Amino acid sequence: MIEDAEERGAISPGQTILEPTSGNTGISLAMICSRKGYPLKVVMPDNVTEERTRLLRMYGAEIVYSPGDQGSNGAVAMALDLAERDASYYMPYQYGNPANPNAHYHGTAVEILDELDEVTAFVAGLGTGGTLMGNGRRFKEEDPDTKIVAAEPLQGELVQGLRSLDDGFIPPIIDLSLLDRKIFVSNRDSVVWTKRLVEEEGLFVGVSSGAIASIAVRVASELDEGNVVFVVCDDGWKYLSSGVYSKPIEELERDGTLESASFW
Ligand SMILES: Cc1ncc(COP(=O)(O)O)c(C=O)c1O
């Protein structure tokens, strides 16, 4: 998104960048902006894990917190409001910027197709929709039968990085006709599968990857053969403080962490 804005002449070093984020895009932007000389302000829910705040500060970003109970929608609303009141900000706006899905169209999907002859189903989480749209478009061009499946949190449950389309905000980059299925996943299943991935496969991943894995396994169980690809968006380091990897699921349920949005 930054390179695209530079190529279009929309920004040059010194320009302040403003972006709403559940944390991860903000951290990437903070790294890139610090190297290229752009001051960065991110708007992020106040209940994300401490690791995100620390990484953003390490890269020199300024953080504005939005109400945690409003999830990433609250961050989007606050950032749009700030941008409207101060025209000096440049907002990449990952939710509406074609450079977001295009990075997957020209990057992630090409890497996957280099490795596999056939993609029967592609499963990813739905945050901005960039991963699903960019990969989905490329895979459908390659083989219109490839099924594109979105893992969506249950309405009212918050898995950081993911959104429910039923909560009222459909990011402008999303073309719903590209999605063959949306499958709901609960917080509990997301955590159960996050733990299974580390315990059974040695994969130390974030909670949205657990959510996506649970759906990928369900899709695979409906097939006789084929390749089901799912995306691990984040490793587990930023979620370590949540206790998800060390406590049994019953304990996480009992002590209330499973329902608490701040958990994510
Ligand atoms: C941890 C995590 N999982 C999933 C997603 C969703 O990806 P996308 O925004 O491409 O839909 C994000 C988005 O930033 C994320 O940070």
Image (tube, rainbow, N blue to C red):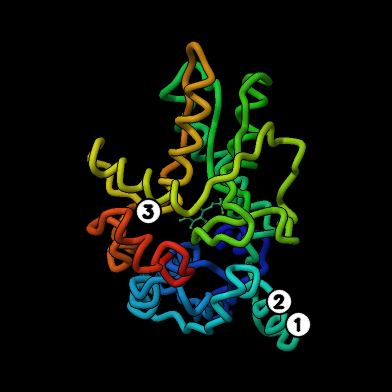
How far apart marks 2 and 1 lie (CA) works out to: 6 Å
Amino acid type assigned to the residue bearing label 3 in the image? Gly
- Earlier residue among tags 2 and 3: 2
Is label 1 in a helix, a strand or a loop? helix
Is label 2 in a helix, a strand or a loop? helix
**Label 3 CB less than 8 angstroms from ligand 1:** yes
69 to the left or right of 179: left
Q: Name the residue tied to disc 3.
A: 206
For mark 2, does the 10 Å Cα neighbourhood hold few (<14), some (14 to 19), or many (20 or more) residues? some
Q: Name the residue tied to disc 2.
A: 80
Q: Residue drawn at (40%, 68%), measured in percent from left and top?
A: 256
Which mark is on residue 84? 1
Where is residue 130? Give x, y as percent: 61, 49
Which quarter of the rendered picture does the N terminus lie within? bottom right
For mark 3, does the 10 Å Cα neighbourhood hold few (<14), some (14 to 19), or many (20 or more) residues? many
Amino acid type assigned to the residue bearing label 2 in the image? Leu
Image marks 2 and 3: residues in contact by CB distance under 8 Å = no
Which of the two discs, 1 and 3, sits closer to the camera? 3
Q: Residue drawn at (37%, 53%), measured in percent from left and top?
A: 206
- Earlier residue among tags 1 and 3: 1
Image marks 2 and 1: residues in contact by CB distance under 8 Å = yes
Amino acid type assigned to the residue bearing label 1 in the image? Glu
